[in-house]
Amino acid sequence: MENKMRKVTYSPFAHGGNSVNKAMLDVIIALVPVILASIIFFRMSSILVLLTTTASAVTFEYISRLILKRYNSCQDLSAVVTGLILGLTLPPNTPLLLAILGSLISIVIVKQLFGGIGNNIFNPAATGRAFLLIAFSVPLTKWVNPITPTYIDATTSATPLSLVKTVMLNIKGGDFEAARTAYNLISADAWNLIKLLFTGEVAGSLGETSALAIIIGLIYLIVKKRIHTEIVASYVISAFVVAAILSFTYDLGPLFPLISILAGGLLFGAVFMATDWVTSPMTKKGRIIFGIGLGILTIIIRTFSNFPEGVVFSIIIMNMATPLIDRHSGNKIFGKVKVKSNEKK
Amino acid sequence: MKKFSFKGGIHIHGSNAKKALTTKSQIIIPKDPEYLYLPLNQQLGKPSKPVVAIGDQVKAGQLIAEKDSSFSANIHAPISGIIEHIDYMINEPTGQFSKSIVIKNDFSNLEVDYITRSSEEAKKLTPKNLVDIMEESGLVGLGGATFPTPVKYFGSKKCDAVVLNGIECEPYNTADYVIMKKHFKEVIRGLKYMMVASGASKGYICIEDNKMDVYETFRQTLTGDSDIVVALFKEKYPQGAEKQLISALFNKDVPYGGLPIDIGVIVNNVGTAKALCDAVELGKPLTHHYLTITGNIKNPSNYYVPVGILFQDLLEEDDLRQNNVLLAGGLMMGKAMYTEMTPVTKGINAIILLENLPKVGPEIACVRCSSCVDNCPAFLSPTTLAQLVKNNKFDELDGYGIVACIECGTCSYVCPSHIPLLDYIRHGKLELRRR
């Protein structure tokens, strides 16, 4: 009888079938409602910006892997996700050259030079966006109204966030009376504003305006178990609480915290950027700390800095804190009385 | 109805369909083969010491190798025959090269005179008597770990509860199910002997909710018995791991690096309870046990086999030819055998034939998705441990709790980057032990 050697390996002899590729595909599917909303509201400019960032992100990924002599990682779709998210955080009518520059920073500097997927310290899209905002703040703070029956043509406009920002700047300046006056301007028709923020018929970055589309994406990710909901929840709740404290202290009315959450990129950042696997902590406890940090920092940056938005900066700052959080938020190991952080030499 | 469960763990894809292959099938008793191969290190601990010589005539049930220390076990001849060989000669399912005793069947079916005990006599046995019976009959844990059973009982620590593990969370295995279905009375009596031996006042029988029929049988049989609790568990892998079982049942954790007896609990497999009952009442040592043979084969079924029979004698030639992978133990925690010329030992409760190993992509960098951390039943961070092993930082492994790892394979199963996390962790454990 033939004595054939059988295939041998270690247990387990089964795999759940999960892969990075599938996870990234799910994120792209979750982004579809957001992309659709941005195309409905901003038409051509949305399509152009998104195509540019995505195509350039994939190209840069391919070229840098080639130069770095690593395996081609384009098929894991992470570059597509980075490109889409970067595009969705940019304002409509962003100069396309800047969009390409953003992709270059995101993919080459932030991701590939650190070793590619899994090894980057910062969220690539958030860092690319932050770079563009700092370096080219003028073109990146020009907003237009969305194309809807209410606004016939794409006129330059103030975003709801910039109104909120005016309130906050006045708080920072110590002029609470002016803050209240500015807030009364928004709150004159607050419920209507909230409605518009929910559907997305306001000026703002491409993917950030429609809370509805983002929530649809979030539900898809929750159903597919691709997202750490504790980050989203703790981020939104802590931002709400901090805004509520501000509102209470300066007597801004009950709707201010809600507007703070819906205006600007907070929801988009919470769902699609803060929950990035690579740059967020690995335990539940750590992720809650991470989310709370994000919420507090976002409102603080919005209130006390000169930048219009605090989401990307808070994400970058908390990314830096992730290794530290990981180290001190380890799960209680089975049967151990207390987690030993690794101090022994 | 309260269902117990532990934190962490996974649902294995298609687990119930895999079990369904063999739950309904008949139990096959294979004809005795010409040769039996009995490795001497069938149990955890020291290999046994042969007490027979080449050429000796042995009867079924006769002692052929005795325990070498207290942490070892006796081995008995399952059939009558002549000792043909005692040598380092055969690979044994642990993968170690070890001494084995080879018995040539003489087909005379001679048996030693078993000391039977009536239920009256059995009731009078003292704990000491019972532990002696466990030792004499070569009882080891039949859940797969082959921990010598008497060792659990002669400690000085006080035992409050004996837990019978009938969970069987491995996706293909149904041998324990068959034991509980066919021999539930023996299992209950075995548990009672264990309670006497340990001095425990409470007994528990643990069953997963995919085996509702045996759960109902036990519950009906035990109505009115307040000492024994039949506990139902949610189906989840690895519910059958003894430490996870204890924390689900008692909401109390076995200390890090400790044993269940440290918190006053003894866990035994249902198969061990049945074997103890046979040893006490029929005087039969542990020479035969149930075994599931399943996978990509024509007639998946449960078998009642003698220890030492070769896999080859149990499997069809067609099935062997069609499949490339031969697993002993289970899909998640078993071992792959490179040849079917491998003997069944006391710890093997399933043989699985698969066409091929699962196709997983090449290993890529960890994307920190934390699936392994969220699902680890020992609450470790497998990816951190793997990273430390990759960087040769073995000294730090203990600080991250590597000893708590039960090698269930959940981390490798869920990893989207296809990192063989458990392989790295095993390497780390081995390296730590070597120091």
Image: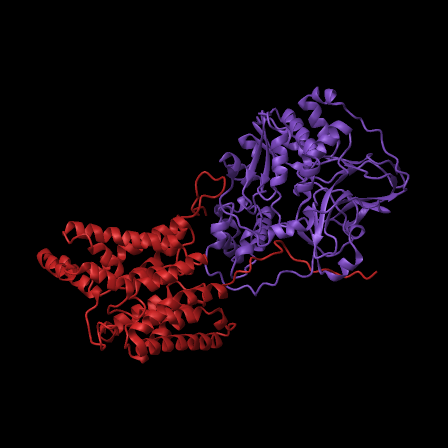
Q: Quadrant of residue A128?
A: bottom left
How many marks overall? Answer: 0
Looking at the image, which residue is at 28% across and 69% down? A205
What's the colour of chain A in the image? red
Residue B392 appears in the picture as rendered: no
Instruction: Determine whether A320 is above or below B68 in the image.
Output: below
Is residue B139 shown left or right of residue B78? left
Q: Position of residue A155 (x, y in %)?
A: 20, 76
Residue furthest toward the front?
A149
| Front residue of B78 and A182 | A182
| Front residue of B32 and B343 | B32
Q: Which chain is purple?
A: B
Instruction: Determine whether B282 is above or below A71 in the image.
Output: above
Q: How is the image coloured?
A: by chain
Q: Position of residue B389 (x, y in %)?
A: 53, 55
Is residue B249 shown left or right of residue A6? left
Q: Position of residue B346 (x, y in %)?
A: 72, 42
Residue A19 appears in the picture as rendered: yes
Q: Position of residue B175 (x, y in %)?
A: 69, 43
| Front residue of B337 and B164 | B164
| Front residue of A44 and B138 | A44
Is residue B120 shown left or right of residue A157? right
Instruction: Determine whether A295 is above or below A66 in the image.
Output: above
